Image (cartoon, helix red, strand yellow):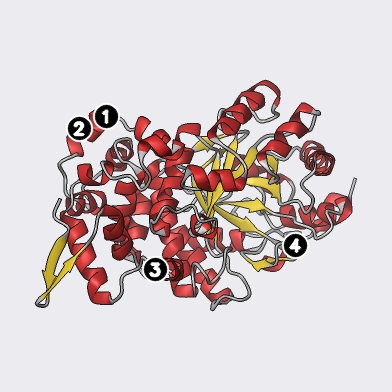
Amino acid sequence: MLLKTRLYGKIYQFNDVKDLLAKANEEKSGDSLAGIAARSEQERVAAKIVLAHALVSDLREAPAVPYEQDEVTRLIQDHVDESVYARIRGWSLAELREFILDTATPPAALTELSRGLTAEVIAAVTKLMSNMDLVVAAQKLRVTATCNTTIGGDGVFAARLQPNHPADSIEGIRASLYEGLAYGAGDAVIGLNPVVDSVAGITRILSLFDEVKRRWEIPTQICVLAHITTQLAAIRAGAPTDLIFQSIAGSEKGNEAFGFTAEHVREALALLRERGTGRGPDVLYFETGQGSELSSGAHHGADQLTMEARCYGFAKPFHPFLVNTVVGFIGPEYLYDARQVIRAGLEDHFMGKLTGLPMGCDACYTNHMRADQNDLENLAMLLVSAGCSYVMGLPHGDDIMLNYQSTGYHDAHTLRLLYGKTAIPEFQDWLVRMELIAPDGRPAERFGDASVFLEG
């Protein structure tokens, strides 16, 4: 593989594929702090030129972490459809990009194509795309998954209802839960981040969610985003659970920093099939975010976009119901400002869908980042244009427990109206029955009125 090019009379030489991928990445503060980013825009362009001429096989044969050292690499490589790969292994990355973006390429062909791609190939083609390319390409991909309901359907845009509370107060959570439901959030999942990661604590919260879901016959899924081992213990103790959650990384070392391995995920699947309350077959929920491997020293010298693509490669064999990138949560050390956050959100969403995952995105930012609510809303609108499956729903977009800013309870419905979408069909019908949404999809008189759930 040729790793150099001449640009404007200067020769640019790259050390290896990992170095090439890092230099071809759009500007990210995390890569710069790690000392692996392009040193100039000219070098970045040169890297993209070299990458465009690289072959699919060049990228597959150069994983970010060697096969023998890393279970994430093994999961990615072992789940490649070799018959599909054999047909495309000689394509250049430029040819792959053109095939994906070609209006004559049907979505079914992209679905088949994805089975022959590794994470490094997906990361590489992403680096050759503009923001509009990422929207156009992702919009062509439709990925569905089913737990109690089905996410990712055509014309559907969902929201996770996230009623976090700074003290895990059951009544505080209940009040926030009712408000979110009244605004039409919660069809993707009712899922809370607990303050205290204990079996007793998350059992109380799951019992509340189950009670509300059953009392009001809500067609959705419930989950508490505790550590996977705590959730396993809670299920064994009798807690009602539709989905098991875990944050994931793009390397075995990164997952070890999160305190789990692939074996824990296999254990979760087996337990949910035996004792879970979700119908399935898709009963897992994963979250990711560019920079997590850098923050734990588990990136193996690779750039954060490539490691993010490997997260999706790890998730793919487990057929999750939900995957979302918490794109601006880690902070400006990894994504410095709104420009970088928006770019990363579009990258992650496209990479996840090309991997074959039902992708959502937490369009968010931290308060020490150079971003604001307008930037967040810009990203949310771009994501809906790209066919994103779901976003988050928080009270007024302000998480008072995790102390970051995201999309509000009311935003999902606004985006549905703006883009001609609905909630997941069963949930949309439920909203109409509850007289929160009119049959034409517009807000009914009691839209946003949480007192609906205090009657009767």
Residue 76 % position (x, y): 39, 37
Amino acid at dot 2: Ala
Q: Are marks 2 and 3 in contact (CB under 8 Å)?
A: no
Q: Is label 4 in a helix, a strand or a loop?
A: loop
Report, in whole angstroms, how far the alpha carbon at label 4 lies from the one at label 2. Answer: 49 Å
Any part of residue 143 in sight: no
As drawn, 117 above or below 96: above
- Report whether 309 appears left or right of 180: left
Mark 2 residue crowding within 10 angstroms, few (<14) / some (14–19) / many (20+): few
Report, in whole angstroms, how far the alpha carbon at label 2 lies from the one at label 3. Answer: 36 Å
Q: Are marks 4 and 3 in contact (CB under 8 Å)?
A: no
Q: Quadrant of residue 262?
A: top right
The numbered disc on residue 35 is 3
Q: Are marks 1 and 2 in contact (CB under 8 Å)?
A: yes
Residue in the foreground of this view, choosing between 3 and 145 = 3
- Report whether 235 appears left or right of 123: right
Report, in whole angstroms, how far the alpha carbon at label 3 lies from the one at label 1. Answer: 35 Å
The numbered disc on residue 86 is 2
As drawn, 145 above or below 342: above
Residue 431 % position (x, y): 69, 48
Q: Are marks 4 and 1 in contact (CB under 8 Å)?
A: no
As drawn, 23 above or below 324: below
Residue 168 % position (x, y): 83, 53
Q: Residue at x 44, y 74 (%)?
A: 339
Any part of residue 417 in sight: yes
Q: Which residue is mark 1?
A: 82
Report, in whole angstroms, how far the alpha carbon at label 1 lies from the one at label 2. Answer: 6 Å
Amino acid at dot 1: Glu
Q: Which residue is mark 4?
A: 401
Q: Residue furthest left?
A: 9
